[in-house]
Amino acid sequence: MPNSASSVAAHAARNRELVALISKKGGDLAARRVIDLHFWAHDEGTAERLADALRAFGVGEVVSDQTESGSSLWNVEGQILASVNEVVAGEFVERLVSLADAHEADFDGWGTSL
């Protein structure tokens, strides 16, 4: 698992690319929309604890499933209503990375429909 600072930096770089792509396609960065949040957990118990923490954080529609490859990885996903600008803010990214770290999981990023 990468350390928090390197994970936040990697997300910041990816977020800059996503913002540029969304802007290029004419997406409104300030419009509130459904944002999908993606996490990886290393076992079922970790996935369940992370899912509970995400719900407490205000994330809705949280689901967790073991990956189809049969590995021990679990995918944890949830949705929030937010703008792209809110999701790429440094403080928000740091909070998600810290939440994942606190539950021995990894924040894998976000996505949205345009």
Image (cartoon, rainbow, N blue to C red):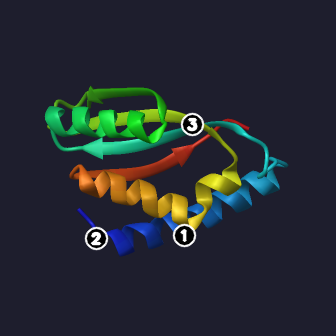
Q: CA distance from mark 1 to mark 3?
A: 22 Å
Q: Which residue is mark 2?
A: 3
* Rendered position, 5 above or below 85: below
The secondary element bearing badge 1 is classed as helix
Q: Work out whether mark 2 precedes mark 1 in sequence or the reverse, and give the earlier one.
A: 2
Q: CA distance from mark 2 to mark 1?
A: 16 Å
Q: Which residue is mark 3?
A: 80
Q: Is residue 71 visible?
A: no
Say which amino acid is labelled 1. Ala
Q: Which residue is mark 1?
A: 13
* Residue at 18% in and 44% down: 42
Give the quadrant of the N terminus: bottom left
Q: Is residue 82 visible?
A: yes
* 10 Å crowding of disc 3: few (<14), some (14-19), many (20+): some
* Rendered position, 87 above or below 39: below
Say which amino acid is labelled 3. Ile
* Residue at 34% in and 35% down: 76
Q: Residue furthest right?
A: 26
The secondary element bearing badge 3 is classed as strand
* Residue at 69% in and 59% down: 19
